[in-house]
Image: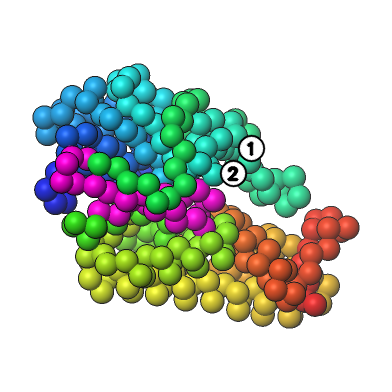
């Protein structure tokens, strides 16, 4: 649907969740995210044709961050839009280019020490290798026309190089999965998965960055469009979630002097957020591990890597 003049939200579904891409159509056409491997041919390309745009007109495809439901369609798009430049955050380049790296370094980095992760081989949804032409660091501007420029923002936390786009003239921010509230909803409004940010201090800086912007509308990868107070409420909920998880982890560790494993602490996190579905609760491994690393750096908890499985305890 057209969300404002020359800006479109493209909707499909994945795992019960909305999956949104965005098409900006000035003199140059820019697509934000490509979905899973089948999204271009199943959804994006037919939509472009319906609104009168040849996919060969695409100038740039920007992957906001390395997750297969945001980058999986890159290789398919490269076949249909041979002139398009592919871009992502420079810090995420390897993970965006190569699904094997995505799985080994992002999805399965906790497998060896904690027994948590995904299948070893990427599924078809993750697409195949696709070269990234441009690595953004934040601060760049993209001219869609002589009168319309969008700004590239570096909004890390969910990944090291996560990008957002800010359309200052329309007070619109396209943030994909940079902000999580207290979890990601299904299309019907019930909870789908826990928060999956990784890097706590970076995530907090992203919240501050977005709070300081003049935003009338927030466009994400899975959440409904937010406007006005909905935006500030969402950002505030995201801050509260960090505080609640910190408290829950510390309370759980206080009760068990012998220490707790990461799997133990995932169960404690779900006690704080019972709306997180049991069958997806393991996805909280990323955020809980991030909290533990931050609490270690603050001198609140210690990691005992000499035991198997690895445990954390209070100092």
Q: At which x and y percent is residue 188? A: 29, 57
Q: Nearer the viewer, residue 99 or 119?
A: 99
Q: Quadrant of the C terminus?
A: bottom right
- Asked if one can make out residue 304 in the rendered structure from this viewpoint, the answer is yes
Q: Residues within 10 Å of mark 2 (few under 14, many from 20)?
A: some
| Residue drawn at x 24%, y 47% as measured from the top left | 149
| Residue drawn at x 75%, y 74% as measured from the top left | 299
Q: At which x and y percent is residue 45? A: 24, 28
Q: At which x and y percent is residue 122? A: 55, 31
Q: Quadrant of the N terminus?
A: top left
Q: CA distance from mark 2 to mark 1?
A: 6 Å
Q: Nearer the viewer, residue 167 or 98?
A: 167
Which quadrant holds residue 19? top left
Q: Residue 107 has which mark?
A: 2
Range drawn in magenta: 144-167
Residue most extreme to the right:
306
Q: Residue 104 has which mark?
A: 1
- 36 part of magenta stretch: no
- 162 part of magenta stretch: yes
Q: Residues within 10 Å of mark 1 (few under 14, many from 20)?
A: some
Q: At which x and y percent is residue 174? A: 31, 53
Q: Is residue 265 left or right of residue 141?
A: right
Q: Are marks 2 and 1 in contact (CB under 8 Å)?
A: yes
Q: Is residue 203 above or below residue 242?
A: above
């Amino acid at each position: 649907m057209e969300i404002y003049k020359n800006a479109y939200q493209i909707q499909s579904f994945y795992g019960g969740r909305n999956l949104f891409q965005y098409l900006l159509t000035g003199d140059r056409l820019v697509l934000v995210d490509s979905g899973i491997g089948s999204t271009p041919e199943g959804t994006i390309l037919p939509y472009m044709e319906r609104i009168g745009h040849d996919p060969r007109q695409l100038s740039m495809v920007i992957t906001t961050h390395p997750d297969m439901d945001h980058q999986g369609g890159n290789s398919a798009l490269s076949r249909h839009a041979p002139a398009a430049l592919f871009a992502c955050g420079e810090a995420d380049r390897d993970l965006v280019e190569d699904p094997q790296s995505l799985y080994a370094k992002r999805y399965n980095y906790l497998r060896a020490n904690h027994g948590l992760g995904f299948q070893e081989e990427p599924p078809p949804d993750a697409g195949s290798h696709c070269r990234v032409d441009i690595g953004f660091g934040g601060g760049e501007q993209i001219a869609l026309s002589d009168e319309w420029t969008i700004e590239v923002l570096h909004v890390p936390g969910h990944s090291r190089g996560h990008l957002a786009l800010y359309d200052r003239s329309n007070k619109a921010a396209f943030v994909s999965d940079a902000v999580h509230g207290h979890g990601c909803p299904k299309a019907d409004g019930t909870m789908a998965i826990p928060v999956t940010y990784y890097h706590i201090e970076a995530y907090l800086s992203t919240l501050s960055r977005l709070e300081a912007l003049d935003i009338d509308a927030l466009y994400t990868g899975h959440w409904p469009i937010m406007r006005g107070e909905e935006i500030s409420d969402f950002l505030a909920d995201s801050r509260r979630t960090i505080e609640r998880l910190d408290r829950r982890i510390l309370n759980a560790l206080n009760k068990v002097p012998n220490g707790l494993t990461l799997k133990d602490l995932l169960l404690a996190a779900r006690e704080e957020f019972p709306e997180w579905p049991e069958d997806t609760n393991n996805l909280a491994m990323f955020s809980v591990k991030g909290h533990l690393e931050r609490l270690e750096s603050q001198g609140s908890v210690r990691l005992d890597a000499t035991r198997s499985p690895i445990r954390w305890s209070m100092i």
